[in-house]
Amino acid sequence: MKKHTKTPRSKPTTLLDTWSRDWLRVRDVIGPGYFAERAFSPGLAYALVLGLYVGSGYLHGTVAAAVSVLTGADYADTYTYEGLWRSVGWIALAVTVWVMVTRLLLPAPTSRPRHVTQRRDAKLALFLYPVATLFGFVVVRLVGSLLGYEPGFPSADHPSTEYIATSVASSAAAGPREEIFLLALPVLLLRCAHRGWTEIVVVLAVLRISFHIYYGIAVIGLLPWAVTAVFLFRYTQSVWPLIAAHSLWDLAASALTFGGDLGEMALLWPMIAFGGCAWLLLGKASRERELSKPLNVPDTR
């Protein structure tokens, strides 16, 4: 009896294959030599990280948040026009410091690792970061409901124009201020001190949630958001998408709080974020399928 054998077929590229090979692959390109090709001692690196935390005003924010939790005080007295100009100053300072570091201290792009998918990864981070933020706040609300209270940002019941303007400016400054001073620069400094990624994730997650303790114990729901930020920066080596996504999220939250009926339009931002993630991920899988076809096949027509 003649044995029939099946013709082997190439396995089509699936969405999971694409994710595991490209999107979810760990790219440890921010190594100890990434930052000016010089090593920092752990003590110096942590001193600089704490200096960024204190110097950028987040220690003060942590103390104010603790006072708010313990005494029930709000932040209305700090939202003045002086605070508005202070927020503008934080944006300018954060951007200036980051440009100086990346232009003057980091090695040239030709001498440090790059990946052809880096730009696409950066686009994905722009949309994935708000999704992680939304998930974090869902967990915050869930933990709060389980504990019998409603976690929320302390704000004035009848905000003045001055209060609203300063709050919006603070929301715009949150992106560059947090992502540069509490994420990008600390990652580079700690990697220069040969600190491992697990340690970096834990330390930066603690710093990121410390000044959000006005949510009470439910602040632990922000841990997935804080961890995601580190991993997105690790994969993309780009802080600008995280800055844009963070500021847009906070501005949308301000619009939802102060915008009245028009504030509901802020909900479009999470929808756009989900749509952008789907578009990039599905589009990449589609292109992978096209590229997996045989090349240089002779034309038999």
Image (cartoon, rainbow, N blue to C red):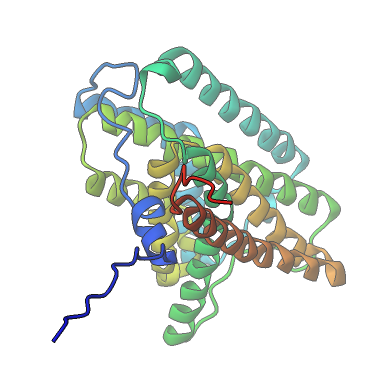
In the picture, the quarter occupied by the N terminus is: bottom left
Is residue 78 visible from the viewing direction of this image? no
Question: Which residue is situated farthest in the top direction here?
Answer: 104
Give the residue drawn at x 77%, y 61%. Answer: 255
* Residue 13 x, y percent position in the rendering: 41, 62
Q: In this view, does 104 lie above or below 41?
A: above
Question: Which residue is situated farthest in the front direction here?
Answer: 1
Give the residue drawn at x 36%, y 22%. Answer: 112
Give the residue drawn at x 86%, y 67%. Answer: 262
The residue closer to the viewer here, 169 or 160, is 169
* Residue 108 x, y percent position in the rendering: 43, 15
Q: In this view, does 111 lie to the left or right of 247?
A: left
Q: Is residue 33 above or below residue 147?
A: above
Give the residue drawn at x 41%, y 58%. Answer: 18
Is residue 217 visible from the viewing direction of this image? yes
* Residue 223 x, y percent position in the rendering: 39, 61
The residue closer to the viewer here, 197 or 170, is 197
Q: How many labels does the image show?
A: 0
Q: In this view, does 34 lie above or below 151?
A: above
Question: Which residue is situated farthest in the left direction here?
Answer: 1
* Residue 126 x, y percent position in the rendering: 58, 50
Q: Is residue 223 left or right of residue 289?
A: left
